[in-house]
Image (cartoon, rainbow, N blue to C red):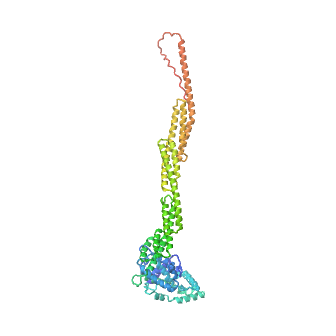
Amino acid sequence: MKNRRFVAVVAVALAAAVFSGDAFAWGPRAQRAITGTSIQVVSRSIKDAYKTTSANYEEDVIKGALAGPSALRDAVGLNSETRATHRIEAEMQLLNYVRNSATGSYFAYRIGVLSSLISDLYLPYMWDTSLDGRKLAAQVNTEIDEHLDNFTYVPLREKPLVIRELRPYLAASRRYMADAALMIQTDYSRGDAYEGYLRNGGAQNAFNAAVQGVSDITYTIMQTEQDLGYLKPSDETLTWFFVDNIEYLLKEKKNAKAADAIYSHFAKVNKGIYSAYEQIGDMYYEFGDKDRAVNEWKLALESRGADRPRIVRKIANYYIEKGKELAASASNPDAPSNALQQALVFFERAMEIDRGNETAARSIQETRVEQKRRDEREQTDREIVSAGETALAEANTLMAQQKYGDALNVYQKAMALFDNVSSEFKAQREQAEAGKKDATGNIRKAITEIIQQGQSLIEEGDRKVEEATKEEDFEAAKRIFQSAQAVLKYIPDSQSSAQVASRDESIALAKTKLEQVDAEKEKWKEDQERRRQLEEQRQAAERARAAAGAAAPAAPAAPAPSATPAPQPFQAPQPVQEDE
């Protein structure tokens, strides 16, 4: 019952293990299944074998299995059963040693790679290098993958074995291989292909043997109950393991913090393998930490070997790249003002480390020329800003003197100057923006004052017309209305629509008032003429009465008083007020 329940768990694992990639011998689906099932077998005896409280490394195991032996640094030599077996022994020794100090995603990945190498030993024709053998192996792999859904793994024992001697174990677990190879060859020769030995238990048997072999070997590595007496791997072996570990963490996991932790182990075991520093530098450079890369390359420079010129070029190229980045950024307003000087420093460093570097020499010359041109452009901007600030101060003085129209003209001149300041230099740009802000605010104030001044002039002209006592008063009123129009025209069309509308309305009113002055003047003249005529009539009447009184005889004695009212004095008729 225990075994049956376990088979069900493993069947689920087979269906769930869906990753991408290719293995060298087994097809990718079969390799996933073998490795995924072995994860379950080992985890049944070692709880959370590939998990921690914060991470699950099972995916890394599968990824390593699909990468296969080609992921190993010296995989080229794995071209025979003997060499593969020797490499499995070395991997068992290495992984068992580092399990307490470097377990994690890369440890799991290497377990997966080892799983693939082990699995290959259980597949017939894996090591047959003949053309027919390779062709037959490819057919077998493809058809096993196609029929994989029919496989069910049943463990041979309750718990994986601890293997003390690998070669006898492999010999015992691979006894079927010779007969299996012969039967497979016979089936494919007569056209039965997969329908013969493979369908009738042969494929399932190879699959089971591979799962059991992977499970026993990986369990042997990870178990802690028995001391296997393994020797410590050489410092060179450990050095390259940690180099590969760092690469995996940077490239696959994007985890610089974890890579730095592994680096501490690398530093302890590396006894003068300078090419390892160079490779780690390359990794950090690709990762994007270029400063760290240069530090590693400088450590590699301690070597006086043939690799030194190559490392020198890498460091020089880094300095050149850094210098070019700074030189290109110099035109950015937010770049440091000394960007070109800093670029020169990097180009000069490149020359110091690589005396004959033509790119560095050319970059130094070009940067010096550009620095001179930049200084000239900066000086031009300084002069423009200074002229703008002078105009702004002049306009402010005119504002204080209430010469708003003149002030507005000078403010606009200041704005034009500030607009001509380039965006290349941050300090000058900020000064220009501050000047434009001040000018804009004062322009608004000047326009408000101009509109008010225009309206005041219109009101003054109205009063002049209403209070006119002579013809010159009307001419003065006309001049006032003309002044109102002239003042209002200081306001340019570029201002806000509300300000322009107020300007136009006031100008139109002043123009209308100006046109009405002559009519008002004629009315006034007509009124004055009527007054003159009435005055002349009154004076004539008085003269007539005076003349009549002098020619009359002496008057008789005055009669007794009567009720007849006394005559009233003469009053000149009032002029008739005409409608305007």
Q: How far from the left and from the top, in percent, is residue 408?
A: 51, 45
Q: Quadrant of residue 188?
A: bottom right
The total of numbered circles placed on residues is 0
Q: How far from the left and from the top, in percent, is residue 276?
A: 47, 75
Residue 419 visible at all? yes
Q: How far from the left and from the top, in percent, is residue 513?
A: 55, 37
Residue 223 falls left or right of residue 323: left
Residue 59 visible at all? no
Residue found farthest to the front: 355
Which quadrant: the N terminus? bottom left
349 vs 397, nearest the viewer: 349
Q: Quadrant of residue 131?
A: bottom right
Residue at 47% in and 45% down:
396
Which quadrant: the C terminus? top right
Q: How far from the left and from the top, in percent, is residue 3?
A: 45, 84
Establish if 472 lies above or below 408: above
535 vs 401, nearest the viewer: 401
Establish if 557 lies above or below 181: above
Establish if 443 lies above or below 211: above
338 vs 5, nearest the viewer: 338
